Image: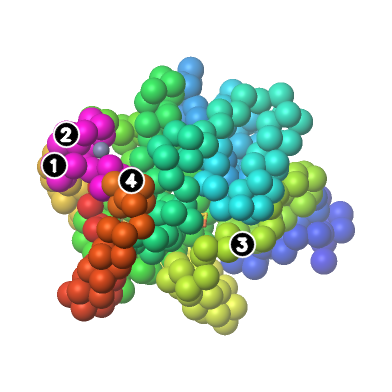
Amino acid sequence: MKCRRCEEQAVVEVRHAHAAYCPTCFVERCREQVSRAIGEHRMIRSGEKVLVAVSGGKDSLAVWDLLLDLGYPADGVYLGLGIGGYSDRSGDCARAFAERRGATLIEIDLASEVGFTIPQAANTRRMPCSACGLAKRHLLNKTALDHGYDVLVTGHNLDDEVAVLFGNTLQWNMPYLARQRPALPESSGFARRVKPLVRLTERETAAYCVIRRIDYIVEECPMASGNRHLLYKELLNTLEERDPGAKATFLNGFADRVAPLLDDLAAQERDSVGTCSRCGSPTTAEVCAFCRLRDQATRPPRRRKKRRRDRSVHAEESPVTGGESRRP
Ligand code: FES
Ligand code: ZN
């Protein structure tokens, strides 16, 4: 196979683009795709302070590397989730990358910052990944605002976005569909949140890291087994195998034809947000979901047992969501 651009030996095939690239042209292509996503969705304006949410995985390290190379002086933030050796190793990858690039990494340790770890949060009625996602959203947004960053970057790639879209479509979760954008504007209590990797697949970000010799944590989070998002990804990979380009068509079709129809709903959602009476974070309830999670996760074990019985009731009420709150 020859590189589509320079005719040298190709090393990466991008099936959905019907093309293959040599290492140099592939890295160039990744930069162009990120630049294009940033420009199309006006993700970052000149002179803005940029914070990248870094997990130590391939996507977050790739996006950080790409932004630095594109001339954005981005800092990183790493959340120590307290998931044993997995957290230790992912933290090491984040720190090693920051050191290699001479970039600033803010570290937040969940246990010392908020008094619980993700394994402790998994003892509540939430699924581990749901509790983890909630804690991450809350703390990353808070860190961005507290440190005066204009924009929070996450490493969501095309595969992530398609899997989320697929799940929200299966459940016709309209508020979530209304919020599914590559760039969510800043609003009261929220920093702008952007996903510059939305044009690159998981395979591409992995190849990018290998070519750029970026060490990332390869193992999956041990708490993620049974995660519905991973099931959707597997199903969509099977589809993509048979019909290359199906994922991008699905996602782009939604962005072009459906998302604009949901603009009013997205605005209504933003307008209905108030502030948590405890921590001041944006929420539609009196007390935000994060404060409620913290109460549950730090509650003495006896009372937590009682909560577990509650879970079965919730599960019966809502077999699809397991009774999880879908509001901020
Ligand atoms: Fe969040 Fe695994 S990284 S549950
Ligand atoms: Zn709160």
Task: Please report whichever mark, 2 or 4, sits nearer to the chain's N-terminal start.
Answer: 2
Q: Which residue is mark 2?
A: 277
> Can you identify the residue that label 3 sits on?
220
Where residue 37 appears, as percent x and y from the top left, is 49, 43
Q: Earlier in the sequence, mark 3 or mark 1?
A: 3
Residue 230 lies, in percent from the top left, at: 50, 69
Nearest to the observer: residue 17 or residue 59: 59
Q: Is residue 301 found left or right of 268 in the rendered image?
A: right
First along the sequence among labels 3 and 2: 3
Which is in the foreground here, disc 2 or disc 4? Answer: 4
Residue 103: image location, x then y, percent: 66, 25
Lower position in the chain sequence, tag 2 or tag 1: 2
Q: Where 5 sits versus 126, above or below?
A: above
Instruction: Name the residue tied to disc 4.
Output: 294
Label 1 crowding class (10 Å Cα cut-off): few <14, some 14-19, many 20+? Answer: few
Residue designated by label 1: 286
